[in-house]
Image (cartoon, rainbow, N blue to C red):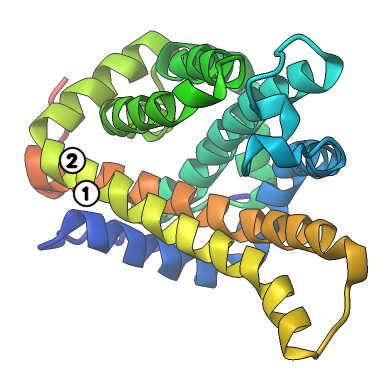
Amino acid sequence: MSDRRAPSTLRRSRHPAVGALDRGGALLQARLRDVLVGSAIILVPAIALNLWMTVVAFDRFDSDDALLPSFAGGTTGSGVEDVSAWMAIWFVSFVTTLVGAFAAQILLGQRFGTVVTMRRAMTQTLKRFPAVAWLWLLTHWWVPVFTLVIVSSQDADVGGLIFMYAVFALFASTFTLLAVPAMVGERIGAFAAAKRAFRLARLRFGACMMFVVLATLLASAFLVGLATLAPLLEVSGFVRFGGLTWLVQGVLVQIGVLAVVPLVALATAQMYVEVRLDAEGLDLVIEADAAFGAVR
């Protein structure tokens, strides 16, 4: 299962954000088995934790707390289930970063002329586990901070805090969007990757922010569609789930995660390529190196 050579597929796009999603999706179709199986292996613990938290959330649902489960409302933030909810959110965020490193191995290899196998991509990702963990801490420190604040806040404050979180997350995600692909593609450490991502995002801030918005809308629409599938089937009379509709919804959403996370990870790696092509003329640099030799 060694890597093999493939034609380099570096092409500029007039709309980098849309082009990244399109080409990421195309590679997902071309390498469907490798990407989905590898990503599923990494995501399985997070999905199992999410399903457990779904059961806990609906088991403790409090009708007086509007639409919030009791562990996410204004009661307490110190119980076992509450701490588990915090840990689930953090863990899913970290595992998604690992999937990003795995997907970047495959996409960047493909774009630069090497077909990286699933085994090779998984091996390289595991070798970089400590670096990915440090990178997650550097670029996602705000996830546990905001989660702790929101989960332990009173109901009256939750709406405003969530809005603040969304705005901050938009800018933070934009400036750290390309950190994982930069680490994989340029073989640099966590701190250097975070700085590199910031510099690249500054070069094409609008395109990077547009990608974050489009990817979020795409993922949200897909997952919400799956979540509403079970109630629609029950209302239409096709299937009766009884009191287990919420559990079916949770399972469907987690199945959707298995498709959405790899797609966004591939598209993010492609966005890294798009930004470097557009802002740094990466294709011209490679062609010049091929013609005249690399400059040391």
Can residue 4 be seen by looking at this rendering?
no
Whole-percent x and y of residue 56? Answer: 85, 36
Q: Position of 249 compared to 73: left or right?
A: right
Q: Position of 186 compared to 10: left or right?
A: right
Q: In the rendered image, which quarter contains the C terminus?
A: top left
Whole-percent x and y of residue 144? Answer: 55, 15
Disc sitting over residue 210 in the figure: 1
Q: Nearer the viewer, mark 2 or mark 1?
A: 1
Between marks 2 and 1, how big is the CA–CA gap? 16 Å
Type of the residue with mark 2: Arg
Residue 132: image quadrant is top right
Disc sitting over residue 64 in the figure: none
Whole-percent x and y of residue 201? Answer: 19, 31
Residue at 25%, 62% (x, y): give it: 19
Type of the residue with mark 1: Met
Disc sitting over residue 276 in the figure: 2
Task: Tell which of 233 and 107 is nearer to you.
Answer: 233
Residue 26: image quadrant is bottom left
Residue at 79%, 90% (x, y): give it: 237
Work out whether 60 lies above or below 22: above
Q: Report crowding for label 2: few under 14, some 14 to 19, many 20 or more residues within 10 A (C-alpha).
A: some
Whole-percent x and y of residue 131? Answer: 54, 15
Can residue 207 be seen by looking at this rendering?
yes
In the structure shown, which secondary structural element does the residue marked by tag 1 occupy? helix
Task: Tell which of 16 and 125 is nearer to you.
Answer: 16
Q: Are marks 2 and 1 in contact (CB under 8 Å)?
A: no
Residue at 66%, 35% (x, y): give it: 65
Work out whether 112 lies above or below 161: below
In the structure shown, which secondary structural element does the residue marked by tag 2 occupy? helix
Residue at 64%, 26% (x, y): give it: 73
Q: Earlier in the sequence, mark 2 or mark 1?
A: 1
